[in-house]
Amino acid sequence: MAVVVSSEEGIEKLQSDLKKLYQWACDWQMLFNVEKCKVIHFGHSNDDGRCVYTFGSNVVKVVKEERDFGAIVHKSLKPTSQCIEAIKSANKTLGMISGTFMFKDKNTMLRLYKSLHIRVRYDRNCNIQSRDGGPTLSKT
């Protein structure tokens, strides 16, 4: 569920919707795992903690970033965390290649690199050069 809340009425409306959803889940015996439910407050003026959302008797956790469908979403919406994770993953794979193979000429490394889809992982997960001064990938 994604909702823009900018006023006290919006907070009350969202909490009311959560109560209705909880009642529906109880009626149909399809309870939610509240431990997996999280709230991310986007924006600079939304950090005051003035709203606490509940689902039944459980308080919904507030987090700064969350991984969903393999993408890391940060409250600032900057891709820095996602890029760092993509670079770590690729570096682990490159470390495995260099530790496993003794003969490391340019062509062999290039074929292994392409066959393990390292380039695809970078392209899919983040922009190689982050605009916010985050990590960058340079050619070696």
Image: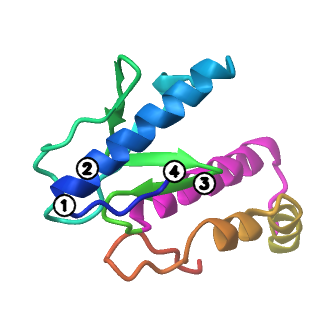
Total of numbered circles in the picture? 4
Q: Residue at x 41, y 59 (%)?
A: 3
What is the distance, in whole Å, between disc 1 and disc 3 at their CAs?
45 Å
What is the distance, in whole Å, between disc 2 and disc 3 at their CAs?
43 Å
Disc nearest the viewer among 1 and 3: 1
* Vertical order, 15 against 115 (above or below): above
The label shown at residue 11 is 2
What is the distance, in whole Å, between disc 4 and disc 3 at their CAs?
35 Å
**x, y (%) of residue 132?**
32, 77
**x, y (%) of residue 84?**
47, 58
Instruction: Name the chief secondary structure element in magenta.
Output: helix
**x, y (%) of residue 140?**
59, 77
Question: Which residue, given by chain and number where applicable, does mark 1 sit on?
Answer: 7
The label shown at residue 1 is 4
Pointer 1 local density, CA inside 10 Å: few below 14, some 14–19, many at least 20: few
Q: Is residue 72 magenta?
A: no
Of the numbered discs 2 and 4, the one sitting upstream in the chain is: 4
